Image (cartoon, rainbow, N blue to C red):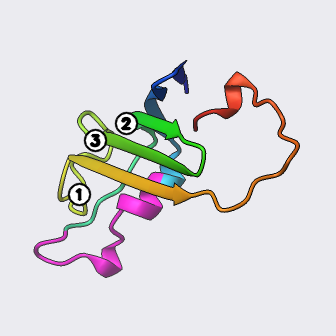
Amino acid sequence: MCTTSLETSAGTSAWRPGLFLRTSAIISGLYGVDPAYATTVRPVYTARGGYAGSQFISALSKRFPHYWLGGFVKWDTLHGAVFEDSPLVKRKQNFTAGFAVSWIFAESKTLCKRSASSRFF
């Protein structure tokens, strides 16, 4: 997955798209329905491997002397996934957001410089 980050005096922002591929064993374990568990509303379903959905994440972060603020938004979609027609799939997309505040009560007197790759995700 590719992550793009931008750090400015206002804070750090990043976004990351994701594409998921899974084996039939993984997808069957999550979305398959064996004959023993089939009902009239949950028919037998055999899953195959392949495309398993996408996600897009965007995050913001700002460090202050004694606290840190961060937030994110994430959109997941199963449109086009090989198991999209599984009777266990109830929604084909999901939106999630979060916000955090962290109080920094202590800090080492000697700090290390972070590399660009360690900033997000």
Check residue 120 in the rendering and tell me which mark sits there, or answer none.
none
Disc 1: which residue = 89
Disc 3 residue type? Leu
**Sequence order check, earlier mark of 2 and 1:** 2
- Image coordinates for residue 57, horizontal then vertical, percent: 39, 35
Q: Residue at x 18, y 53 (%)?
A: 91
Instruction: Indicate which disc residue 78 carries.
Output: 3
* Displayed quadrant of residue 86: bottom left
Residue 58 lies in the magenta stretch:
no
Is 34 contained in the magenta span? yes
Q: Depth-wise, is mark 2 or mark 3 nearer the camera?
A: 2
3 and 1 marks in contact (CB < 8 Å): yes
Task: Name the residue beneath numbered marker 2.
Answer: 55
User: What amino acid does circle 1 point to?
Assistant: Val
The residue segment tinted magenta is 27-42
Question: Which corner quadrant holds the C terminus?
Answer: top right
| Identity of the residue drawn at 11% across and 72% down | 41
Q: CA distance from mark 2 to mark 1?
A: 17 Å
